[in-house]
Image: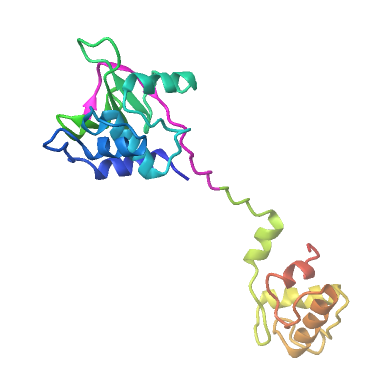
Amino acid sequence: MTTASNVLAIARRELGTRGRADGTSKYGAWYERAKPAPGFAAGAWCQMFLSWCANEAGIPESAFPRMAYTPYAVAWFRQRGRWGKTPKVGALVYFNFPGGDAVDHVEIVEAVRKDGSIVTIGGNVANRVTRSVRRSNIAGYGYPAYSEPEPAKAKPEPNWTEALVKKLPTLRKGDHGWHVKTLTYLLVARDFAIDTEAIDDTVFTAYHEQGVKGLQDAAGIEVDGIVGPQTWPVLLKIA
C-alpha cells in the first residue's frame, strides 16, 4: 500500500536537486511528457515536483492531483472535501506569500513540531529541492487519499485452559516426577487402567506409554505415547 511515508522517502532522496541552467527542471520535463503539456518543462515546478513524487510512489491521480498550477490543486482538494487548516504529516501545505492574491507555492509536510511550526520539503525553493521550517503565510492543507496499511491484528489472549496446557511439560517414557504422578491417575480416571500397586506412580513406564497410546487412539490424535499439547487436553477433558 502507498502511504505518506513512501512519498516523503522519495522527496527526501531529491533534496538538493536543482533546476537546470536552461530554466527547465527534471520535474517540469516529466510533467510536459506525462500530460502532455508543451512548454511546462521550464515552468515553476513546486507543484510538479510533488506530482512527480506521487507518480514515483505509484499513487493514482484520483488520490493525489497531478497538476502544475497551485490554485487548481487547491480547488481539486476543496472539491473532494480534502482541504483544511490542520497540519498533518504527508499533507500538502499551500502558501500565500505577501504580494500575491492566490496560493503561489506548495510543499509537503514532513513533520509537525510541538511549537506549531512544520518541517517541509519543497521544490523550486531557490531553484532546488529544500527542507524548510515553516510557520507563516500558510493558506491551508490538502490531504491526499493515501492508502494506509491495516493495523496488525492483536493476537487473542489465551483462555485459561490454553494457558494451563502451555505450562504443562511434555512427558515420555523414562521421565519422573509429580507430573507423572498426575498422569498416572488421570489415565486411571479415563479408564486406561494402570496397576498402581505394581509400579512407582512417579515414573513414566511402559505401562504409562501403553495407556497414553490407547487414549490417543480413542481421541483420534497422533498415537506416539508422548504426553504433549495434544494429549494433555484429552487427559484433562478440556478438548
9 and 215: which is toward the camera: 9
Specify whether residue 210 is painted magenta. Answer: no
User: Against 215, is 104 above or below?
Assistant: above
**Which residue is at a point 32% across and 24% down the rendered structure image?**
93
Q: Quadrant of the C terminus?
A: bottom right
Residue 204 at what x, y percent from top left?
70, 84
**Which residue is at a point 20% across and 10% down the rendered structure image?**
99
**Main secondary-structure element of the magenta-colored stretch:** loop
User: Against 198, is 21 above or below?
Assistant: above
108 and 213: which is toward the camera: 108
Counting labels gives 0
Q: Quadrant of residue 106?
A: top left
Q: Quadrant of residue 77?
A: top left
Q: Is residue 67 left or right of residue 147?
A: left
Point out the residue furthest to the front here.
38
Q: Is residue 64 left or right of residue 118?
A: right
Point out the residue furthest to the right here.
191
Which span of residues is magenta-colored? 132-152
